[in-house]
């Protein structure tokens, strides 16, 4: 045990200053009763949290196995040079977070692997370190997006869907009329007129945003990455929706974060009870969500649930980071509200690769609380974002061309999704389920469990020039090995119909 303790380093990091739990508990563990007046100093207060986090990591890694004895209060106090109060608080934090159980007169033990509280999700929902990619997954990820004949793998569309010519024209005109857009050094948080337009549009979906609290990024992916880097630190636990957009899972892995995947219910969006129980258990530091038009399920969380999640997050100090990139692609007239509409603390990320042009690489992030940190991280990673495309988008948003374009884009996507969905229902064997998206580009297909090895299907399809996104890259485990995602963005034609028939045929052959 002492060896393990020595392995745990102790930098003084100020994570929390809150008083997580009541100090009036009775002395069950051979330590004198602590007084509530015995307030912790800030450094002691953050210290117990840091030590608890390290012990949690040792438990998660299996270094401290289930039901093994944890260090006593006295050992912790001596080894870490902390007071008995702080040592006890460390152990009680672990107990409150269901990592430890206390046994009267014996001390603290690592919790058994079964759930210890009806309010705490089972071991399946315990934080996970995302394993490095196995070779096959790496191959699949590399191949998603690589050239192929029938493009059913991406989450964007044919060039004809986007105002490419208009954007080209705008950029040419702007580079003549405003040469400083190319000639000046890129400084600051983005092109001010674009930020004004983004803030103006945000009012329509329930968000009052100060343009100064917006920073323009290289795509929505950079916006999410900066938000995570500004708010969480290595080893923290992040909750995500499951199935989860695979780039996001890889990002969490690369940032050395731990993840809890909360599965969607039958309605196609996250199980709210499980999610908020996690918030209450104080396990998660952040929740990264695609609350609108989730990728891959295509559903939005209803407003009343968003409001509830936002309230719970605020109450339990969970940071919401929202990827709203598909919000503008909703089918129908009413654009869904983001989580930010329900809490000023939610960080909102979005961009124009799904609406204006996949190659434009302009995204943005808005945060009321973390903008300075985000701006500093941006400055020291990519310094700024190219201004000319920002100016062209600002122009598109300002003169109304964007709205007319969106109406057309949404209509076309809805029709393409419908055609591919019907083809799947027509050709695939009974027992196949296919999502019914409210917007976006993609469909999620689920075969009967055990009936499909999607890794094999992926390779078969690739060999025939058909790209699909295999289910297993949307989770850290095997739970979606019988699923895959199809992109409808490249429209309906004979090649697509033929590809769906071939996929269906391979799936039928794999049925027992
Ligand atoms: C959910 C989601 N977020 C972000 C992105 C990427 O956004 P960007 O190209 O603006 O970086 C994608 C691309 O497919 C996506 O599906």
Image (cartoon, helix red, strand yellow):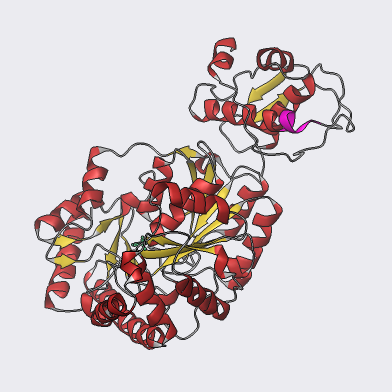
Does the rendering let one see residue 419?
A: no
Write the start and end of the magenta stretch as one range.
40-45
The answer to whether residue 94 is above or below residue 480 is above
Q: Residue furthest left?
A: 464
Does the rendering let one see residue 474?
A: yes
**Along the line of sight, the residue nearer the viewer: 200 or 501:** 200
- Quadrant of the rendered structure where residue 435 is? bottom left
**Along the line of sight, the residue nearer the viewer: 147 or 452:** 147
The answer to whether residue 28 is above or below residue 142 is above
Image location of residue 418, percent across then percent down: 31, 80
Image location of residue 469, percent across then percent down: 27, 58
Horizontal relation, residue 27 to residue 167: left or right: right
Q: Quadrant of the N terminus?
A: top right
- Quadrant of the rendered structure where residue 53 is? top right
Horizontal relation, residue 54 to residue 249: left or right: right
Q: Quadrant of ligand 1?
A: bottom left
Image location of residue 402, percent across then percent down: 39, 83
**Along the line of sight, the residue nearer the viewer: 448 or 454:** 454
Horizontal relation, residue 197 to residue 306: left or right: left
The residue at the point 16 percent across, 51 percent down is: 459
The residue at the point 74 percent across, 14 percent down is: 74
Image location of residue 166, percent across then percent down: 27, 83
- Quadrant of the rendered structure where residue 200 is? bottom right
The residue at the point 72 percent across, 30 percent down is: 43
Magenta-colored stretch includes residue 114: no
Q: Kindly report the secondary structure that dominates the magenta region of the rendered protein.
A: helix
Q: How many marks?
A: 0
The residue at the point 30 percent across, 50 percent down is: 450
């Amino acid at each position: 045990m002492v060896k393990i303790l020595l392995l745990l380093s102790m930098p003084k990091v100020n994570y929390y200053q809150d008083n997580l739990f009541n100090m009036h508990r009775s002395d069950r563990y051979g330590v004198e009763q602590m007084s509530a007046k015995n307030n912790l100093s800030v450094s002691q207060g953050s210290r117990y949290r840091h030590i608890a986090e390290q012990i949690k990591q040792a438990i998660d890694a299996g270094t401290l196995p289930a039901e093994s004895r944890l260090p006593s209060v006295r050992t912790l106090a001596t080894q870490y040079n902390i007071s008995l109060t702080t040592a006890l608080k460390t152990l009680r934090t672990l107990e409150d977070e269901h990592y430890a159980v206390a046994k009267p007169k014996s001390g603290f033990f690592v919790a058994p692997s079964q759930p210890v509280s009806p309010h705490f999700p089972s071991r399946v929902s315990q934080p996970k370190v995302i394993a490095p990619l196995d070779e096959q997954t790496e191959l699949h990820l590399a191949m998603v997006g690589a050239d192929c004949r029938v493009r059913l793998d991406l989450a964007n569309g044919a060039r004809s869907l986007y105002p490419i010519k208009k954007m080209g024209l705008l950029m040419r005109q702007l580079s003549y009329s405003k040469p400083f857009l190319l000639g000046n050094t890129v400084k600051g948080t983005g092109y001010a007129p674009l930020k004004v337009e983004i803030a103006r549009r945000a009012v329509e979906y329930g968000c009052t945003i100060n343009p100064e609290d917006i920073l323009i990024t290289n795509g929505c992916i950079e916006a999410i990455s900066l938000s995570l880097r500004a708010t969480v630190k290595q080893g923290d636990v992040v909750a995500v929706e499951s199935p989860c957009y695979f780039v996001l899972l890889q990002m969490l892995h690369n940032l050395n974060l731990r993840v809890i995947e909360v599965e969607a219910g039958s309605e196609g969006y996250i199980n709210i009870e499980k999610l908020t129980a996690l918030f209450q258990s104080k396990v998660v530091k952040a929740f990264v969500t695609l609350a609108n038009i989730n990728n891959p399920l295509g559903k939005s969380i209803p407003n009343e649930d968003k409001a509830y999640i936002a309230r719970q997050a605020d109450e339990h100090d969970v940071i919401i980071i929202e990827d709203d990139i598909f919000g503008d692609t909703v089918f129908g007239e009413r654009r869904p509200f983001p989580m930010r509409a329900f809490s000023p603390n939610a960080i909102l990320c979005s961009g124009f690769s799904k609406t204006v042009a996949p190659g434009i690489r302009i995204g943005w992030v808005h945060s009321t609380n973390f903008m300075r940190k985000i701006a500093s991280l941006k400055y020291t990673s990519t310094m700024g974002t190219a201004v000319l495309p920002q100016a062209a988008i600002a122009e598109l948003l300002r003169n109304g061309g964007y709205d007319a374009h969106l109406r057309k884009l949404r209509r076309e996507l809805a029709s393409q999704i419908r055609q591919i969905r019907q083809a799947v229902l027509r050709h695939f064997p009974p027992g196949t389920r296919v999502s019914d998206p409210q917007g976006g580009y993609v469909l999620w297909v689920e075969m009967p469990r055990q009936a499909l090895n999607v890794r094999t299907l992926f390779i078969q399809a690739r060999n025939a020039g058909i790209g699909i996104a295999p289910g297993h890259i949307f989770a850290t485990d095997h739970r979606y090995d019988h699923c895959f995602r199809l992109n409808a963005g490249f429209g309906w034609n004979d090649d697509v119909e033929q590809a769906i028939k071939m996929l269906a045929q391979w799936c039928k052959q794999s049925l027992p």
